[in-house]
Image (cartoon, rainbow, N blue to C red):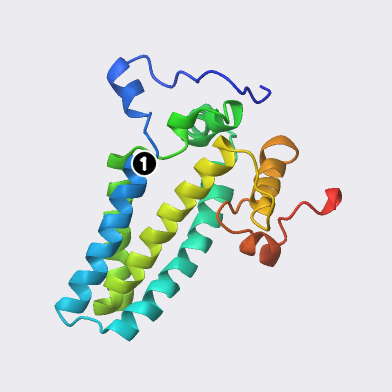
Amino acid sequence: MKPNHKGQAQLFKNPVLERMTRTHIALPISIFLIIATGLLYYGITHSFINVLEALGLFFLGWFIFTLIEYLAHRYIFHMNTDTPVKARLQYTVHGNHHDYPKDKKRLAMPPIISLLYASIFFFVFKLIFGQFVFGVVAGILFGYASYLAVHYIVHAYAPPKNFLKYLWIYHGIHHYKDSETYYGVSSPLWDFILGTTDKKNK
């Protein structure tokens, strides 16, 4: 199916489930910015981390998120659809976005699902980083909020006349030329490192 600039995919026959797949972008961005701020505040005020540690850990978490974003987009959102179940899952999670890239209500994961993932990430990274988890996960959640903002802006607005235009170009290549390139949305860093840039169109 060719990308459609208008309309929406119907993912579920159940109207309640269908409604839950649509999210105003401001809601998840606000939620995760608030949580990220709360984690930093809690970590500092309860002496788990100091201000300098919080700053360094925050940027480490943000950097980690860029890799999570890349890997999730490449290997989960664009999974091999070699079975009907996987094909259905991939379309529900991401394929519908490629068919209807201008559907503004499906540019973010429903908050209830993303909050569940965020909780899992917190406990996993707590095992890895211990008390430093407050700074790291704050950076990861800020990275996710930034990704949501960039993804929404790239799809909803015309590209600016500055260096940020490259984000529009990269994501446009992914959507309209070759969906196996430029998996990074908020940053093309890992595409350059791991060789998934659009080499043939350069």
Q: Residue at x 43, y 22 (%)?
A: 11
| Image location (x, y in percent) of residue 35 | 26, 58
What residue is shown at x 58% (from left), y 31% (from top)? 101
Judging depth in this view, the residue of 78 and 51 nearest the camera is: 51
Specify whether residue 83 is in view: no
Say above or below: 26 vs 2.
below
Say which element carries label 1. Answer: helix
Q: Is residue 146 visible?
A: yes
| x and y, in percent, of residue 56 in the image | 40, 80
The answer to which of 188 and 168 lies nearer the viewer is 168
Residue 192, compared with residue 8, is above or below; it is: below
Compare residues 147 and 86 and report the one nearer the observer. Answer: 147
* The N terminus: image quadrant: top right
Mark 1 is on which residue type?
A: Ala
Q: Residues within 10 Å of mark 1 (few under 14, many from 20)?
A: few
Quadrant of the rendered image containing residue 179? top right
Across and down, in percent, residue 48 comes to: 20, 81
In screen coordinates, is 194 left or right of 53?
right
Residue under the image location 37 percent in, 34 percent down = 24
Task: Please tell me which residue is depicted at 73% across the width and 55% down the height of the picture.
Answer: 197
